[in-house]
Amino acid sequence: MTAPILVFGATGGIGEALTRRLIAANQPVFLSARDQQRLAALAGEVGAPHAAADILDEAALGSVVQRAAEEGALGGLAFCVGSIVVKPLHNASAADFLEAFRLNVLGPALAVKAAGASLKQGRGSVVLFSSVAVGQGFTHHSVISAAKGGVEGLVRALAAELAPEVRVNAVAPSLTRTPLAAPFTRSDAMARGIAQLHALARLGEADDIAAAAAFLLSPDSGWVTGQVIGVDGGRSRVRTKG
């Protein structure tokens, strides 16, 4: 049987889209999220094993990995947990920076640490999530850009440390229609304005990001590691006006 892929943050917009893609491709999954009720509902709908956990609780992560890798091996790990903090620096607190670091950098580091042996046994793939903001220098993004910059550094360090058995990559989206991004997309006028900043003139959808993550988790990306793949409607590289 194919080794399962462990999806943390399975009940989020991208996590759920990725879960559904993997299941549609007949890839076994094990789902985890913090909200037990929502997790159980999703897992029941798609017929997947699951366990709730706080991603900053090392003991809980270890328990999740043990349950997910019943045969000892994991085929992959996707860490679909994160945050979006947009505020000017003069309004940002030390707690804002620390919380963003804990969720976006410490969380995946602990998850990969817990799953390392199982991933090596399964010659698995790890996918983390960065942001277009790391390379673009957007105003009011100091908190999240700093945290996601840490994700990119973590990807490269882990890709070196876990090679050759485990591949580690990241997807760097631009603004995507997910519940996490709702404050920026619930206004049609604001959503249209942000969409026009992209060469492809639309916002991302969760499945756009999930498609890239599924590719990085699959054997089709077997010679790809240490990379940060932009899935951002062209915003990181392309300007069509001015």
Image (cartoon, rainbow, N blue to C red):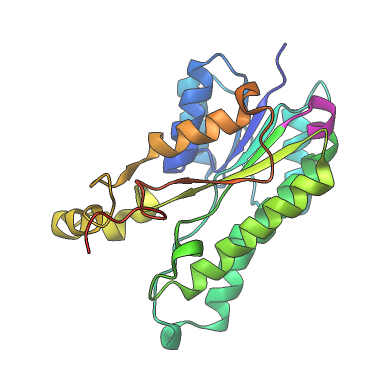
Main secondary-structure element of the magenta-colored stretch: helix
The residue under the point 39% across, 34% down is 207
Quarter of the rendering occupied by the N terminus: top right
Span highlighted in magenta in the image? 118-124
Residue that protrudes farthest toward the left in the picture: 189
Where residue 83 appears, x then y in whole percent?
Answer: 49, 59
Where residue 4 appears, x then y in whole percent?
Answer: 68, 24
Indicate whether 98 appears above or below 5: below
Indicate whether 220 appears above or below 204: above
* Snapshot quadrant of residue 3: top right
Q: Give whichever of 113, 57 is nearer the camera.
A: 113
Indicate whether 69 appears above or below 92: above
Quarter of the rendering occupied by the C terminus: bottom left
| Total residue callouts | 0
Whether residue 117 sits left or right of residue 69 in the image: it is right
Where residue 114 appears, x then y in whole percent?
Answer: 79, 45
Residue that protrudes farthest toward the front in the picture: 242
The residue under the point 64% across, 43% down is 169
Residue that protrudes farthest toward the bottom in the picture: 90
Where residue 217 appears, x then y in whole percent?
Answer: 62, 30
Visible in this render: residue 172? yes
Visible in this render: residue 30? no
The residue under the point 72% across, 47% down is 111
Q: Determine if the magenta segment contains residue 121.
A: yes
The residue under the point 64% across, 63% down is 150
Whether residue 154 sits left or right of residue 182 in the image: it is right
Whether residue 12 sits left or right of residue 100 in the image: it is left
Q: Determine if the magenta segment contains residue 120.
A: yes
